[in-house]
Every structure is written in structure tokens, then in C-alpha cells.
Amino acid sequence: MAIVKVWITDDCTACNLCVDTCPEVFELPDDKAEVIAGADFNAFEDEIIEAAEACPVEAIKYTEVDGEDDDPQDEEDWGDDEDFDDEDFDDEEFEDEEFDDGDYDDDYDDR
């Protein structure tokens, strides 16, 4: 798994626990903890999870994704040609159906 997003909700009480746990990701500039811009979530994944689990008001949230590339354009995800059975495709269904291209509303084209 990989953490791709970390945020602090408005429930934060500024207890500083997250900063103590992972100062590379969290800071406390004011009355609410913040995630440091550009922080490397992957390098501190365990610490982020630890801070989120230890937060007394559960104000630390994060999004994890599977570490694999889930890009639908990845050819490996397309399946094999043998998965497609031409016999299942009924091309007769798409043969010339009755279509009258001259039967349209003339008023629609009055621009």
C-alpha cells in the first residue's frame, strides 16, 4: 500500500502528538496541525499511520492505494485475445436497421 494523501480535519486540538510522531510530515504553526507541503508520504508511511491511530480526536486522515499500477491503459490489464469469443458477438444485430435519414424536424434546423 502507498499513502497518496494526508490531511487534518477541523477536529484537531493542536495537541502536537502528530508532530512528535512524525515531524517530517506534520507541523503545528497555529491552532491546528498541518501537513507539510511536499512531504514524502511513502518514506514515512508507518509514522503517518501511527500518528493517525494515536490522534486522540481522530483528526488525521489519509488515503492509501494499492501499490500496483491500476492504469486501465496498461496492456497487461487488457486480458488475452482468447478471452474474447467471436461467437458471442451477434453482428446481425447491428445490420441495417430501418433508418430514415430524411425524417427529421425541419424546425430544429432554424437557427
Image (cartoon, helix red, strand yellow):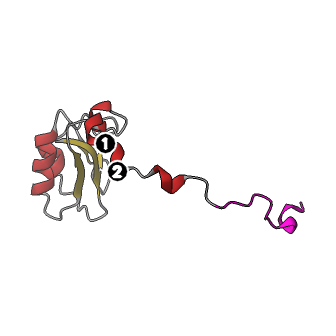
- The residue segment tinted magenta is 98-111
Placement of 104 over or under 16, stated as above or below: below
Of 74 and 56, nearer the camera is 74
User: Which mark, residue 17?
Assistant: none
Q: Residue at x 23, y 38 (%)?
A: 41
User: Residue at label 2?
Assistant: 88
Magenta: main secondary structure: loop
Q: Residue at x 34, y 47 (%)?
A: 87
Report crowding for label 1: few under 14, some 14 to 19, many 20 or more residues within 10 A (C-alpha).
Answer: few
Placement of 50 over or under 70, stated as above or below: below
Of 97 and 108, nearer the camera is 97
Circle 2 SS class: helix
Within the magenta stretch, is there residue 11?
no
Q: Residue 38 sits in which quadrant?
A: top left
Q: Residue at x 19, y 39 (%)?
A: 23
Task: Estimate the spatial distance between the alpha carbons at disc 2 and disc 1, rounded to whole Å.
Answer: 8 Å
User: Residue at label 1?
Assistant: 84
Q: Position of residue 36 (x, y in %)?
A: 30, 40
Q: Quadrant of the C terminus?
A: bottom right
Q: Quadrant of the N terminus?
A: top left
Disc 1 marks which amino acid? Phe
Within the magenta stretch, is there residue 100?
yes
Circle 1 SS class: loop
Residues at circles 2 and 1 in contact by the CB criterion of under 8 Å: yes
Horizontally, residue 47 falls left or right of residue 30, namely left
Disc 2 marks which amino acid? Asp
Q: Position of residue 22 (x, y in %)?
A: 15, 41
Q: Position of residue 56 (x, y in %)?
A: 13, 63
The extreme right residue here reads 110
